[in-house]
Amino acid sequence: MVEAAAATETTKVPLFLEVTGEPEAGKTHLSCLMPKPALLDLTAGGESEIILKRLHPSDWKQRYWRIRSSADIETALKSILANKDNFKTVIFDTSADLRAMCSKEYIKELNKQGKERQALMPAEYKWVNENIDGFIDRIKSPDGKFCMNLVFTAQMRDEWRDNKPTGRRIRKGYPDANYQSNLRFYLQVLQKLDPKTMSYIEGEYERKCTVIKNTFRNKTDKVDWIPDLKESELNWEGVKKLTKLETGELVE
């Protein structure tokens, strides 16, 4: 459990949030509601652009980067740092796309060295993970140049065992975000339930946010732990409530 340290003029607490869920659950939407976002879009078709346009119509072009390589990320981070007052949150949409991109770059490098690869061996993912960890550390380190909030989005995928689908859906994201993040959410779009009849309402839906991880609260304490966020709380104020930190202590 992270103890909230008293903030000083130069010390703020940057959050690392992972938002997981099925397509159209609202992962990118929630991410873009974080303070002063910079959206690094790694999706195959640039699907995140339209969401940022809708939420930040006046300056979305200054907040959006289409990412196809690590060099693109470096270009984006250089621009973000040069305009630091305009940015407080860096979003990677999605973390699985980030890892896949870094993996392809490493395969290409191995092939240049004559070590022919179509795919990486498990031990070779160490370089890929170190590369991604480098981005994480640079962006969220409280004593670094950035000191910004970081958001990873993560899709879901079918689970397979012994070459057979289990019928379950599991997280598809950067594996190390499990323990590196401060907060992890699972978003769902569910059919509304009538509290009087306890039956589903046809054609009406709502979002549910399950808090999977929160290093700021004690999960064993029923009074302290907040297991869910209401749909109306899927914003920066709702996220702040989970941390127990005061305005001025967080990066915002």
Image (cartoon, rainbow, N blue to C red):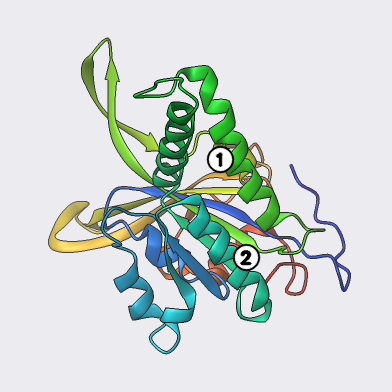
What residue is disc 2 on?
Answer: 240
Task: Please report the residue visible at 38 percent of the width from the left and 74 percent of the height from the top.
Answer: 52
Question: Any mark on residue 103, and which?
Answer: none
Disc 2: CA contacts within 10 A as few (<14), some (14-19) or many (>=20): some
**Left or right of residue 232, residue 12 in this image:** right
Q: Is residue 155 visible?
A: yes
Which dot, 1 or 2, sits closer to the camera?
1
Residue 250 sits in quarter: bottom right
Q: Is residue 223 visible?
A: no
**Left or right of residue 148, residue 94 in this image:** left
What residue is disc 1 on?
Answer: 177
Query: Please, what is the three-letter code of the amino acid marked with disc 1?
Result: Ala
Measuring from the top left, give residue 81's x and y in whole percent: 66, 70
Residue 24 sits in quarter: bottom left
The mark that comes first in sequence, 1 or 2, is: 1
> The residue tagged with tag 1: helix, strand or loop?
helix
Residue lying at the far left of the rendered structure: 202
- On the rendered image, what quadrant is the N terminus found in? top right
Measuring from the top left, give residue 163's x and y in whole percent: 23, 13
Query: Please, what is the three-letter code of the amino acid marked with disc 2?
Result: Lys
Residue 27 sits in quarter: bottom left
